[in-house]
């Protein structure tokens, strides 16, 4: 393997610097006792204390986590069953049609998902708030779970199911004792991605959230529009640490279990 | 539906999801695009869309999306290329990806500080002797922040397709006397073009529909299609007009996807730039 030339190293170092500088800049000023993001005065924990003393903010964090966990769980259940159903569709045309419908919400811009769900909820008469946010998050997470589970199902040999049938397993046994254990890494990958999509989402939530209910993203948006508060910096430092923990945990979990989801990326 | 012996009862929730959250929302958007403010049928929204105001907005939205995509490719391609040559390339790739997991709002917020009148960007400018500039709320800051946010989404697919190239092909090209540049132009680039296409797909459409960065970073200097939709739905409350813009955004999306060809499996999944 060719060694990297010096200009290449400098270029890569520069890209990494640009990518990480803003994040560390935010975290650095979360310790500033002056109220701004310029001119560091003294080291302080006061902004972190402010985060933990703000009951409203803590409730919002709790809301965000509850929505993320619930939506990830429900969308994983529906998505896994959907993926199994798609695999067993014998009709090629039908299967392709379902697969294209599946990708619609993945490729749609968030503004469109948000706006169309807003129309939908208003027409059906769902009150905007916790329910509409949860349902939206479930809705946009399902196709991601399906995409993560399908490759595992495709690589599963059908003789496994035939063998189970020959040995007298019922439909239910085949599902719970053969298929599900086999595709477990895909299920975990799907669940994890659904979780992060939900935690990360701003645009869709912003459209369907109404007045009384907020998730962390929506709250940060309204705080940021009002101007700079170092409470956001402290909050983002905390979020950064949690995100990093989740991503690295997932990465090493995947490395060990040998799943091919890796960074959730494309794969030959 | 021709299904094997089993009754696909477990498909029911999934099909209900498709009907309610994939087909119905699109149908509703199309339906609303024909309604005026009082809910009567009209074609006025479509006429409006082709009026000069909206037409100019669409053009400028495309122009910015084009700029953002082009700059992202120019920065991401060498990055991806050299990353494939590093020793622990998967780890480095992970490090490129991590910033994309950080909430978009926090990154945008960081730039409010960085580009602020007393922020580090202006301190650097003053260090070189120029006065403090208004960087925030300009189209420069908008393009910069958008490129910053999209770089990981561009690097990932390009990296994957470069990484897939059989090194024997490059050796063969060298053995046959091709220079480094010729090898790149005639062998590497054509083989990795699919990665670039997926990257363009993952960046261009979100760049058309962004509204967070325009609101926070560009003030009201830049209005993208996404900003216009958000404005019509949540501020002006003119759902008809908003839906019309959304219909066109969907059309543009389909055209772009057709142009950039069949996407690589899972490629768009990483285009979660919100």
Image (spheres, grey):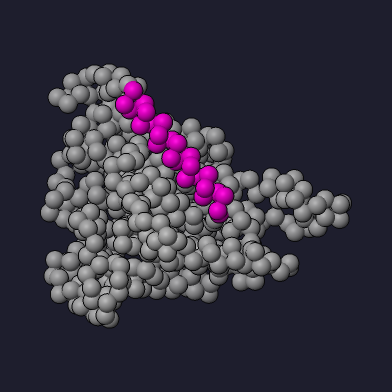
Task: Answer with left or right where residue B230 lies relative to residue B175.
Answer: left
On screen, residue A68 above or below B203:
below
The residue sitting at 60% across, 66% down in the picture is A10
The span picked out in magenta is B52-76
Q: Position of residue A85 (x, y in %)?
A: 44, 49
- Whether residue B235 is visible: yes
Is A112 or B266 nearer to us in this picture?
Answer: A112
Task: Answer with left or right where residue B130 lies relative to residue B185.
Answer: left
Residue at the limit of the structure toward the right, as seen here: B176
Q: Position of residue B108 (x, y in %)?
A: 34, 56
Q: Is residue A230 within the magenta segment? A: no
On screen, residue A28 above or below A193:
below
Q: Position of residue A89 (x, y in %)?
A: 49, 44
Residue at the limit of the structure toward the front, as seen here: B129
Q: Is residue B57 within the magenta segment? A: yes
Image quadrant holding the N terminus of chain B, namely top left
The residue sitting at 80% across, 52% down in the picture is B179
- Whether residue B212 is visible: no
The residue sitting at 28% across, 42% down in the picture is B220
Q: Position of residue B162 (x, y in %)?
A: 65, 55
Task: Answer with left or right where residue A10 lies relative to residue B184.
Answer: left
Task: Answer with left or right where residue A258 lies relative to residue A61.
Answer: right
Is B96 or B194 nearer to us in this picture?
Answer: B96
Count of numbered marks: 0
Residue A268, image quadrant: bottom right
Residue A227, image quadrant: bottom left
Is A13 or B79 nearer to us in this picture?
Answer: A13
- The secondary structure making up most of the magenta span is helix
The residue sitting at 48% across, 70% down in the picture is A251
């Amino acid at each position: 393997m060719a060694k990297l030339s010096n200009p290449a190293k400098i270029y890569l170092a520069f890209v990494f610097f640009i990518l990480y500088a803003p994040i560390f800049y935010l975290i650095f000023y979360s310790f500033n006792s002056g109220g701004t993001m310029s001119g560091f005065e003294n080291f302080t924990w006061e902004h972190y204390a402010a985060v933990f003393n703000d009951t409203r903010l803590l409730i919002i964090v709790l809301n965000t986590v509850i929505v993320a966990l619930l939506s990830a769980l429900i969308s994983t259940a529906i998505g896994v069953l959907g993926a199994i159903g798609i695999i067993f569709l014998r009709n090629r045309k039908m299967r392709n049609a379902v697969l294209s419908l599946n990708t619609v919400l993945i490729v749609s811009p968030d503004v469109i998902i948000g706006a169309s769900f807003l129309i939908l909820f208003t027409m059906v008469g769902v009150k905007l708030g916790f329910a509409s946010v949860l349902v939206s998050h479930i809705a946009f997470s399902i196709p991601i779970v399906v995409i993560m589970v399908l490759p595992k199902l495709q690589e599963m040999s059908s003789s496994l199911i035939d063998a189970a049938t020959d040995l007298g397993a019922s439909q239910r046994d085949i599902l719970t004792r053969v298929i599900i254990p086999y595709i477990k890494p895909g299920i975990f990958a799907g669940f994890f991605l659904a979780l992060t999509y939900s935690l990360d989402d701003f645009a869709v939530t912003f459209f369907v959230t109404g007045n009384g209910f907020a998730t962390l993203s929506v709250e940060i948006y309204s705080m940021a529009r009002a101007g700079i508060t170092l409470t956001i910096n402290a909050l983002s430092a905390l979020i950064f640490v949690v995100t990093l923990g989740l991503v690295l945990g997932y990465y090493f979990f995947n490395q060990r279990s040998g799943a091919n989801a890796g960074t959730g990326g494309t794969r030959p | 539906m021709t299904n094997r012996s089993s009754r696909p009862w477990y498909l029911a929730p999934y099909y209900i999801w498709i009907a309610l959250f994939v087909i119905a929302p699109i149908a509703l958007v199309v339906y609303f695009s024909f309604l005026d403010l009082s809910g009567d049928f009209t074609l006025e929204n479509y006429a409006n869309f082709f009026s000069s105001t909206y037409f100019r907005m669409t053009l400028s939205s495309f122009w910015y999306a084009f700029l953002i995509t082009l700059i992202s490719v120019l920065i991401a391609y060498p990055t991806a290329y050299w990353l494939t040559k590093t020793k622990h390339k998967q780890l480095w790739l992970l490090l490129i990806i991590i910033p994309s997991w950080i909430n978009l709002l926090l990154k945008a917020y960081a730039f409010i500080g960085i580009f602020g009148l007393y922020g580090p960007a202006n301190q650097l400018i003053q260090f070189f002797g120029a006065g403090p500039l208004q960087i925030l709320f300009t189209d420069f800051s908008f393009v910069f922040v958008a490129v910053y946010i999209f770089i990981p989404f561009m690097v990932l697919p390009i990296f994957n397709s470069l990484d897939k190239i059989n090194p024997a092909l490059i050796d063969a090209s060298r053995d046959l006397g091709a220079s480094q540049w010729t090898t790149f132009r005639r062998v590497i680039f054509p083989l990795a073009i699919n990665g670039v296409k997926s990257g363009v797909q993952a960046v261009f459409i979100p760049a058309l529909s962004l509204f967070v960065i325009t609101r926070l970073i560009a003030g009201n200097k830049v209005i993208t299609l996404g900003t216009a939709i958000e404005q019509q739905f949540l501020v002006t409350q003119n759902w008809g007009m908003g839906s019309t813009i959304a219909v066109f955004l969907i059309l543009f999306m389909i055209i772009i996807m057709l142009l950039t060809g069949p996407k690589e499996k899972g490629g768009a999944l990483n285009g979660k730039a919100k």
